[in-house]
Amino acid sequence: MPEAVVSSARTSPRIVAVANQKGGVGKTTTTINLATALAAVHRKVLIIDLDPQGNASTGVGISRATRTVNTYHVLSALAPVERAILPTLVPGLHIVPAGVDLAGAEIELVTSEQREYRLRTALTGHLSGFDHVLIDCPPSLGLLTLNALVAAETVIVPLQCEFFALEGVSHLVKTIERIKKTFNPRLALQGVVLTMFDKRNNLSDMVANDVRGFFGAKVYNTVIPRNVRISEAPSHGKPALIYDLRCPGSQAYVHLASEVLRQESVCDTGTIRDGDAQR
């Protein structure tokens, strides 16, 4: 696991949207396992499942029967976020789950006042006990993702190592810039995570080189490999780091968490704290 770090001087949690309008890129897997790795170094972490499919909730062992108060109720102002927070099997990791009713929220929000700010309003002043909040966004650039980006401080983009990867993510980058100008001036691209990397495939190397050429230092050094154990873990209701810590995919997320902590400590203080350096 990443080495333990001292607590940040921040008085509010760092809210990060994990987003990509393309499905199947490892977005939910990244959310779950990055959150688990951060919790393992004694960070208090909250996942907000904003995808109507609810895969992040399933992936940390939250049954559908226990999602009676969920992100739909929070967005609709039917319940405060505190009522929706559930513990997971990972110490220090909690989640606001998604229920099937979230699918209708996007339609309902269209005619709502302050529709872009619903999530930000619901979270402001209510998350003082957490260090990190990771929002798992749906695979689209609709109102749910817009709410996540307006509420967030930064965005992490998982990017699958496949043809047309850059073409798809360019739309998200433009969206981030528009939201920064219109709704959330603090929003920034925190980083790009290369996922589903197959070292036997020349295409993976080509895509990785293209992405690094386009985004430069915004691309994390850690790449997430294709790994069957990562694919198996959600069916057991466990993060891959709990299901099989030693598998290559889990180890990659451990190293990614180290990079993220190091990056954030530099942003917060301008210096690297002991223990934040990558192992």
Image (cartoon, rainbow, N blue to C red):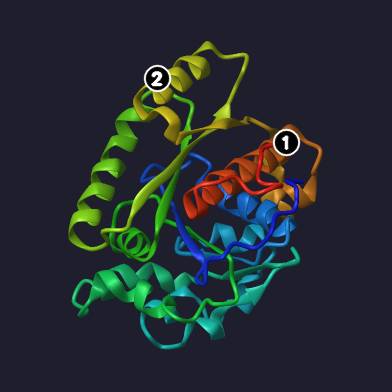
The numbered disc on residue 240 is: none
Nearer to the camera, 7 or 106: 7
Can you give x and y, in whole percent of width and height, for residue 116 in the image? 26, 69
Question: In percent of the image, x 34 and y 63: which residue is there?
Answer: 144
Q: Amino acid at mark 1?
A: Arg
Place of residue 29 in the rendered image (x, y in percent of width and height, measured from the top left): 59, 47
Callout 2 amino acid: Asp
Toward the top, the furthest residue is 202
> Is residue 241 shown left or right of residue 170?
right
Relative to 102, say whether 208 is above or below: above
Q: What kind of element bears circle 1?
A: loop
Q: Quick check: 47 left or right of 172?
A: right
**Residue at 37% across, 85% down:** 77
User: Which residue does the numbered mark 2 point to in the structure image?
Assistant: 210
Nearer to the camera, 212 or 238: 212
Residue 279: which numbered mark, if any?
1
Q: CA distance from mark 2 to mark 1?
A: 26 Å
Of labels 2 and 1, the one closer to you: 1
How many other residues sit within 10 Å of disc 1, few (<14), some (14-19) or many (≥20)? few
